[in-house]
Image: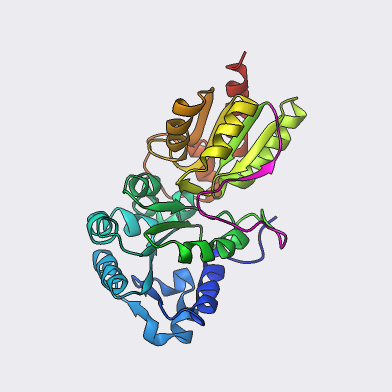
Amino acid sequence: MLDEREIRQTLASALVEAAKTDDRIVVLEADLMSCHATKVFKEAYPDRFINVGIAEQNLIGVAAGLATMGKIPFAYSFAPFATRRCYDQIFISVAYSGLNVKIVGSEPGVAAEANGGTHMPFEDMALMRAIPGMVCVEPTDATQMEGLLPAILDYNGPVYIRMFRKKAEKIYCADAPKFELGKAYRLKEGKDVTLMASGIMVARALEAADSLKEQGISARVVNVCTWKPLDKDEIVACASETGAIVTCENHNVYGGLGSAIAELTVRECPVPMELVGVNDKFGQVGKNAYLSEVYGITANDIVEAAKRAVARKK
């Protein structure tokens, strides 16, 4: 079921609310206010909103400067421009300098749809995960985005928020847990294999778990919303208890969530793993459903990967 709230509107409204009691919060845009629903922040706090124009390197430079003055800047752009285009500025001006800048990269992976390959980031988390001290998080729905904001504000350092802009499949309700950075959230129990998913892939993992149950396979589902730092305890526990892992990501498998989890489990608890994600491809124009089929990131792809992982246990 689709969430009633868009993630972009939820984040913008939550920032407006938080800014009532925290005058350090500033929002910066690269001329995409309508795309990100940040006009609501501009209207509420015009003196704390800056549109730098289509100049992403400058966006990060200005954000870094504001952070040196004690502000908490949220710098928005489409994910490829918030990461690839200004990577050196992020690395040196923000992370190397230890500054408290929050970067919001929207329309990750196949969510870019009609914008095509130039705007379709399958590598943004790999880039950001490689930066020392950078926290990398991908909220799953509006409730989780809203719930993570206090933790993002409390963390004194750079954070990359990989944001699906529109209405996502609803995963969490009003009784959602208190969300923390660096924590994974178990959504469904299972004993044969663990499906570890992020973003739009969480709903697909849950769908796959239902299909696997009909085929006699008990699949655990875990929402790994923080790619860095990983929830070591939960991931190792799942590897030990189910004996197999399938990672599910709307991202290139090279350097992505599967790579991150493999890096951990190979040291702590090696088990058979399968990686469902984009396999070293560029983006292209198309609808989400079509692109998901093309790149092999559907619920059925997760089902087949889970069966392979379970078979390797025997």
Residue 191 position in % (x across, y down): 70, 28
Color encoding of the figure: rainbow
Left or right: residue 181 versus residue 48 is: right
Magenta stretch: give its range. Answer: 173-191
Residue 167 visible in the displayed image: no
Based on the picture, tell me whether residue 112 belongs to the magenta stretch: no
Residue 255 position in % (x across, y down): 38, 38
Q: Nearer the viewer, residue 117 or 127?
A: 127
Question: Residue at position x 67%, y 26% from top?
Answer: 192
Residue 174 position in % (x across, y down): 71, 63
Residue 219 visible in the displayed image: yes
Question: Residue at position x 33%, y 55% from top?
Answer: 83
Label the magenta part by its dominant secondary structure. Answer: loop
Name above or below for residue 108 compared with residue 47: above
Left or right: residue 241 versus residue 26 is: right
Question: Residue at position x 45%, y 26% from top?
Answer: 266
Q: Quadrant of the C terminus?
A: top right
Residue 186 position in % (x across, y down): 65, 43
